[in-house]
Amino acid sequence: MNDVLFQGIGMTSRRTRDRLISRLREQGISNEQVLVTVRDTPRHIFIDEALSHRAYEDSSLPIGFNQTISQPYIVARMTELLLEDGPLETVLEVGTGSGYQTAILAQLVGQVYSVERIRGLQEKARKRIQQLRFRNVMFRHTDGGMGWPDKGPFDGIMITAAPEQVPEELLTQLKVGGVMVLPVGDGNSQVLMRVRRTGDEEFERETLENVRFVPMLAGTVR
């Protein structure tokens, strides 16, 4: 990543990012490719300028529309889980949000298909991805629960908001052998899950850790 994108956020930028990566290692993130990508991706461009001084903290931050940018640990953790079985060619991201997770995926997989229900968020994310000159991302404004069937089935699916149950429609868009990573639960209790499609109608589900995400709102596009 071009270091020009880090100009204007202080001389300590690299040390701050290195500190963040050290913390992610301590929390158990071990995929070096994921760690380098998180370190070298300018998170500050995905949040409001007023919060840019907090960009490299390991915390979630507001991005408007009652949505948040996930903390770096969660981004790294979900990405690591998605890629654990090896490289992926096509990934569906449900919930573009700020575009930060999109940018991480764009550097690690062949093609990213990202859907977002809030047009204002999607338009900002598209501009940021263009600024970073990634050419392997496609965007669609739609209800996330519908996915993007015309582009599937996908090697991987990442959901960045929490449905109360694993969405059946999205399971059908996962290739046999593919992996889905998502939070599941309501506002009081959510867990991070990984689902592997092992056959036409066969899925293996792992519950990994407690998390907290904004809810996935089906049937609402704005």
Image (cartoon, rainbow, N blue to C red):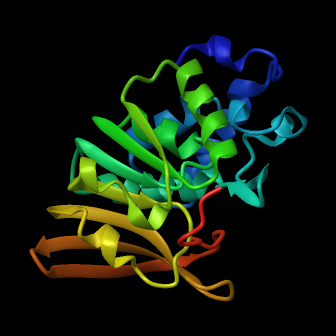
Whole-percent x, y for residue 62 in the image: 79, 53
Q: What residue appears at the point 64 percent right and 29 percent down from the top-left corner?
A: 42
Q: Quadrant of residue 32?
A: top left
Furthest residue in direction bottom, as rendered? 188
Q: What residue appears at the point 22 percent right and 41 percent down from the top-left corner?
A: 89
Whole-percent x, y for residue 15 in the image: 71, 29
Q: Quadrant of residue 136?
A: top left
Q: What residue appears at the point 77 percent right and 61 percent down from the top-left corner?
A: 66
Q: Is residue 28 left or right of residue 108?
A: right
Furthest residue in direction left, as rendered? 199
Q: What residue appears at the point 63 percent right and 69 percent down from the top-left corner?
A: 213
Q: Front-most of 95 and 82?
A: 95
Q: Indicate the quadrant containing the C terminus: top left, top right, bottom left or bottom right.
A: bottom right
Q: Quadrant of residue 171?
A: bottom left
Q: Front-most of 53 and 30?
A: 53
Whether residue 94 is situated above or below residue 4 in the rendered picture: below
Whether residue 147 is situated above or below residue 48 in the rendered picture: below
Q: Is residue 66 left or right of residue 103?
A: right
Whole-percent x, y for residue 59 in the image: 73, 55
Whole-percent x, y for residue 218 in the image: 53, 72
Whether residue 122 is situated above or below residue 172 in the rendered picture: above
Q: Front-most of 193 and 92?
A: 92
Furthest residue in direction top, as rendered? 4
Q: Is residue 182 visible?
A: yes
Q: Is residue 119 left or right of residue 91?
A: right
